[in-house]
Image: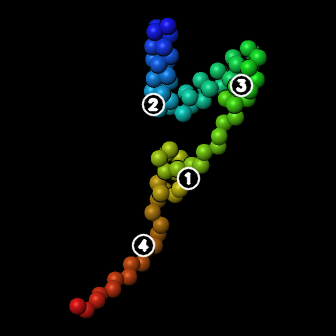
Amino acid sequence: MQEVIVAVVVCCAAMAVLKRYLPRAARNAVRQSIARIAGKLGWQRMAHRLEAEKKIAASCDDGCGSCGGCGAPSSQPAEKRIFIRKL
């Protein structure tokens, strides 16, 4: 019984490491292959859950440039206003 518990813990730890450090394309490929296997085994709920990929909004850290922060700077510099207060 102890070996089974250790094996489950090791598998969970390996899944957590892979989920964190595996590239998104590889994670999607693994998810689709597991969904296909689950569908063949008759586990339709699990297959449906794995196939339903959540659409994540693009962010600056994924490198797509959708936020406009990575593109060329605008031709006109931003106007800065400076206020001086008397003490």
The disc labelled 3 sits on which kind of residue?
Ala
The disc labelled 2 sits on which kind of residue?
Tyr
Q: Earlier in the sequence, mark 3 or mark 2?
A: 2
Residue beneath disc 1 = 66
Mark 3 element type? helix
Q: Earlier in the sequence, mark 3 or mark 4?
A: 3
Between label 1 and label 2, give the one nearer the viewer: 2
Work out how far the residue at label 1 is from the one at label 2, CA to CA, in angstroms: 23 Å
* Number of the label disc, if any, that sits on residue 4: none
Q: Residues within 10 Å of mark 2 (few under 14, many from 20)?
A: few
- Proximity of marks 4 and 2: CB atoms separated by less than 8 Å: no
Q: Is residue 8 above or below residue 32?
A: above
Work out how far the residue at label 4 is from the one at label 2, CA to CA, in angstroms: 39 Å
- Proximity of marks 1 and 4: CB atoms separated by less than 8 Å: no
Mark 4 element type? loop
Residue beneath disc 4 = 77
Residue at 66%, 25% in the rendered image: 32
Q: Earlier in the sequence, mark 1 or mark 2?
A: 2
Residue beneath disc 3 = 47
Q: Earlier in the sequence, mark 4 or mark 2?
A: 2
Between label 1 and label 3, give the one nearer the viewer: 3
Work out how far the residue at label 3 is from the one at label 2, CA to CA, in angstroms: 23 Å
Residue at 64%, 43% in the rendered image: 55
Mark 2 element type? helix
Work out how far the residue at label 1 is from the one at label 4, CA to CA, in angstroms: 21 Å
Between label 3 and label 2, give the one nearer the viewer: 3
Residue 45: x percent and y percent? 74, 26
> Is residue 49 or residue 67 the one in the foreground?
49
> Is residue 30 or residue 4 the one in the foreground?
4
Mark 1 element type? loop
Residue 13: x percent and y percent? 45, 23
Residue beneath disc 2 = 21
